[in-house]
Image (cartoon, helix red, strand yellow):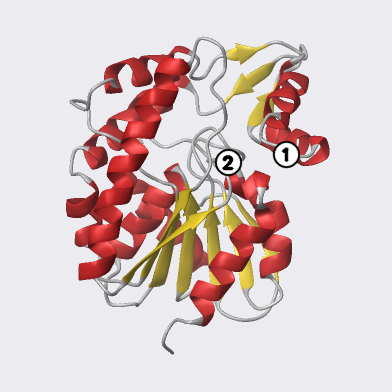
Amino acid sequence: MTLLHVHDHGGDGPHLVLLHGYGRSLADWDASAAQLTAGHRVLAVDLPGHGRSPRISPWTIPAVVRHLADTLDARGVSEAVVVGHSLGGLVAVEYARANPDRARARAAVNLDGFWWGREYPGAERVSEGLLASAGTIAPPGYIEAQVVQHARFGIPADRAETAARAAARPLPDGRWQTLPERADALEIVDELDRLGALGVTRWLGGTDRPLLVVQAGRRLSPAPGMEWFDAFSSRFAQEVSAELAELSRTRPAISVRRIDATHPMILETPEAVSTLVATFVGELPD
């Protein structure tokens, strides 16, 4: 049994379990969690191979779901709403799918967690770019560079620095081991490709638990040389939006919202994210 690293933010009320995105850590949730504790017991979790959680091999989403369930069992959490951002959003949906009788998963929230299959036009180029920097050893100025990059999203420097430090492992010579390590990253991308190949309708259509899906409503101007990725992601987001609109009409358990934020929404607009989550949970049937 593998237990994952958890930060218990405290609070009273229904349990919320918060999951972060690829290459991130539970620290991304700090600002939102501080607000959610007003009406919930809030636990944030590092996914395997991220933050302070141990690595697993192979890194598969069914294995992650199993380790998450074991971790919650060890803490006496019998039922929770699982809320995930990006990669964590995919895991949240799969956790709910694995527990359709509400024994563990009361509901799930997916914050901009979507992927594409290998055959999607342009997908190979995106995967190559993602894996090119996976698990690298970053120079001593890595954290400062991350703060500058996050400033493009309007993320305050102190929040960006805390999140960046929690998402990498310091080395004795002042450099940083970025996470996940390369072997884990290769397996994670394989899992993303597997789920993405299903398509949004087929993937989400098989979920019986109440599900809130939140899409980023804004896009930033692309960085120089990355115009191709902006076109790729814009096309994909439009296709996802169309499928979600149809799903929300035919599947009452699926609610769809857009948020005035870019993809790193939990760092960029934590207040808006916490409001969406709290409203959704507050409207769930007893």
Q: Dot 1: few (<14), some (14–19), or many (≥20) neighbours within 10 Å? A: many
When asked about the image quadrant of residue 16, the answer is: bottom right
Residue plotted at (72% across, 37% down): 154
Badge 2 element: loop
Q: Do residues under tags 1 and 2 come within 8 Å of each other at their CB atoms?
A: yes
Quick check: can you spot residue 188?
Answer: no
Residue plotted at (72% across, 54% down): 31
Badge 1 element: loop
Q: Which residue is mark 1?
A: 155
Compared with 48, 18 (above or below) is below
Quick check: can you spot residue 223?
Answer: yes
- The three-letter amino acid code for the residue at tag 1 is Ile
Seen from this angle, which residue lies furthest right? Answer: 158
Q: Give percent across and percent down for residue 220.
A: 57, 31
When asked about the image quadrant of residue 276, the answer is: bottom right
Residue plotted at (58% across, 72% down): 278
Q: Which residue is mark 2?
A: 264
When asked about the image quadrant of residue 137, the answer is: top right
Q: Quadrant of the C terminus?
A: bottom left
- The three-letter amino acid code for the residue at tag 2 is Pro
The numbered mark, 1 or 2, whose residue comes first in the sequence reads 1
Residue plotted at (18% across, 44% down): 198
User: With 195 as the anchor, is 174 left or right in this view?
Assistant: right
Q: Give percent across and percent down for residue 161.
A: 77, 33
Q: How many numbered marks are there?
A: 2
Of 98 and 74, nearer the camera is: 98
